[in-house]
Each structure stands twice: as C-alpha cells, then as structure tokens.
Amino acid sequence: MMQNIQAQAQQLAESIVQATAVTHNVGSTTQQRAEAVAFFEQLKHGEIHSTVYAAAVLTGNEYSLEVQMSAYTLLQILVCNRWAELSADEHQKITQLAYQHMKDVGHLGQQAAWPLKSKAAMLLAAVARQQGPDAYSALLPQLISSAAEGPMQAEISCMVLQFVSEDLTQFEERGGEWKRSYLSALLASVEKVLPFVVRLLQESFQSGSSAAQQGNAEAARQHAAVVPAALGTLGGFVEWAPMGRLCGGSVVEACSFFLGVPDFRDAALAVVKQIVGRKHNKDPGEVEAYAATMAKVGGALTAAAA
C-alpha cells in the first residue's frame, strides 16, 4: 500500500509543479489557469494520503519558491481541515516535518523569503493546534530555545506563537473540553511568553543597532525583522492575557519605547490599540490591574506625543 501511495504521490507532485508553473506564467491562457485552479481545488478534497505525501516532498528547498509556497499552502489546508483522516504515523511525520522546516528555514539566511518563513511558521502552528494542548506546551520551550540560535530563528518562533494564539482565540470553531483545555494551556504559557518576547525585543533592537553601527547591513536587517514579529506576538496575546500580567510585566513599557522609534511605531501602536480595546473586567482581581495598565498606556501615549 505504501508503494502505491508513493507512486501516486510522485505523479501528483509532478502535476503540482506543472500547475504551479501555469499559474505563474504570464503566457498562460485563461483556460489553462482555470484548469490549474480547479486541479488545486480537487487536491483539497480528493485522496488525502498521497496528496499529503506529495505536498510534503515539494516543501523541500530543492524546489522553486513558487512550488514550495503551493505545497505549504496545500499541506496547511489539509492539516487544518482533514487532520482526523490521517493516521497516527502520518501525524507524527507531518509534525516532525513542520518542526524541521521551521529550523531549516531559520538557517537559510538571505535565501529565506518572508513568505517562506511565514508559511513554515503557519504550518507548525496548525500542527501544534491539531496535536492539542500537550503538544503546544511541549513546543513552547523548543521555540524559546530555538530563538536563541539567531535572529531568523527568533523571528519564526515569534510567528508561530502569534499564529497559535490568533488561530485558537479567533478562528478555532471547535468548542467543548478540547478548546477549554487548549485555552488553559495557552493561558498558562503567558508567564513565559510575555517575558520572552519583551526580552527578545530589547536584545534584537540592541543587536540591530550595534550591527548597523559596525556596517553589517545584513545582520542589522535580520535583527530588525525580529522586532515587528515580536510585536506581532504581543498583539496576539494582549487581546486576552490577564491584565495583571500586562501590568506587572514590561509589555506597555516595551511598546512605549518603540512608539519613539519611527521604523517600529506602527507595529507598537497596533499592540497599544489592542490593549486599549480590552473590555473592563469586573473580576475583583482584575479591576486594579486594568486601571493601572490603562494609566501606563495613557502615560506612554502622552510621552510619545510630546
């Protein structure tokens, strides 16, 4: 059976490469493009095992960026929508693939286009969500450890955390005990995630400034790219994290600092807006924290406008 799946996957992979070429070829006719789009739609709903195998193969760095993007998109859709149809062995292999790609893309340097980094992060976030709260809890220390390997790894780690948070709190349709358990794991991770991100913001900005002063433009660019990714992660967590954690940590202070840095002002302001948009929580334990956090935000905005 496995040989049959591999044979089908090989044929599918060749067809995916051809269809991708059609969609990116300015000389393709309207009919050819329509057929390519219909083919990709068919893959989303057809035989899943060989399709997953083919898509996984095509995410490899030996293929063009366009082919990798098509493969990542297809694989992510199958993971999000048809995970239950895959076997436990397939779950494990996809999980290993997603984590390895996150590591590999983070070491590509200038070769790693932003869309590729984003797709690798989205795939790992989708896998972590499907695997459940225990998988997320196990992944978190790996992401934090990976971020220490370099700025590109740090950027991707931040993306994964942002996507997990946003997917679960905004787009997850499943409810019941599964969602309650995952939200509980996400909530428990706040005390690790927020200090990690704030520290990463400080270190990345300092390292980027130092690299720029030394004339190392590429290193400065890589460190600078971590800042909006880290602010994006904060944005994914401050919408729902307990106010006590926001007030007691350095989240507002970090955003306040970057409000004064033109290149990162908009990203920092987006986080501040999300904090300000929080509804007043009447829980006795949150009332004081809410007032104190809003006072901090008010001070930060006043200082930025001065």
Image (cartoon, rainbow, N blue to C red):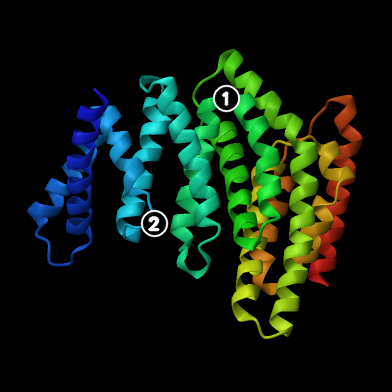
Q: Which residue is drawn at 39% across and 56% down?
A: 61
Q: In which quarter of the image is residue 185?
A: top right
The kind of residue tagged 2 is: Asn
Q: Which residue is drawn at 61% across and 65% down?
A: 225
Is residue 225 in view? yes
Q: Is residue 20 toward the left or the right of residue 132 in the image? A: left
Q: Which of 197 and 124 is in front in this view?
A: 124
The kind of residue tagged 1 is: Gly
Q: In the rendering, at what x and y percent does residue 156 appear?
A: 58, 53
Callout 1 crowding tier (Cα within 10 Å): few <14, some 14–19, many ≥20: some
Q: Which mark is residue 235?
A: none
What element does badge 1 sit on?
Answer: loop
Q: In the rendering, at what x and y percent does residue 100 appear?
A: 51, 45
Q: Quadrant of the C terminus?
A: bottom right
Callout 2 crowding tier (Cα within 10 Å): few <14, some 14–19, many ≥20: some
Circle 2 is placed at which residue position?
61
Q: Quadrant of residue 8?
A: top left
Q: Is residue 130 toward the left or the right of residue 28 in the image? A: right
Of mark 1 and mark 2, the one earlier in the sequence is: 2
- Determine whether 227 is above or below 221 in the image: above
Residue at the top extreme of this rendering: 177
Q: Which residue is drawn at 71% across and 78% down?
A: 211
Q: Which residue is drawn at 49% across and 25% down?
A: 173
Q: In the rendering, at what x and y percent does residue 64 appear?
A: 31, 60
Q: Is residue 184 toward the left or the right of residue 257 in the image? A: left
Circle 1 is placed at which residue position?
132
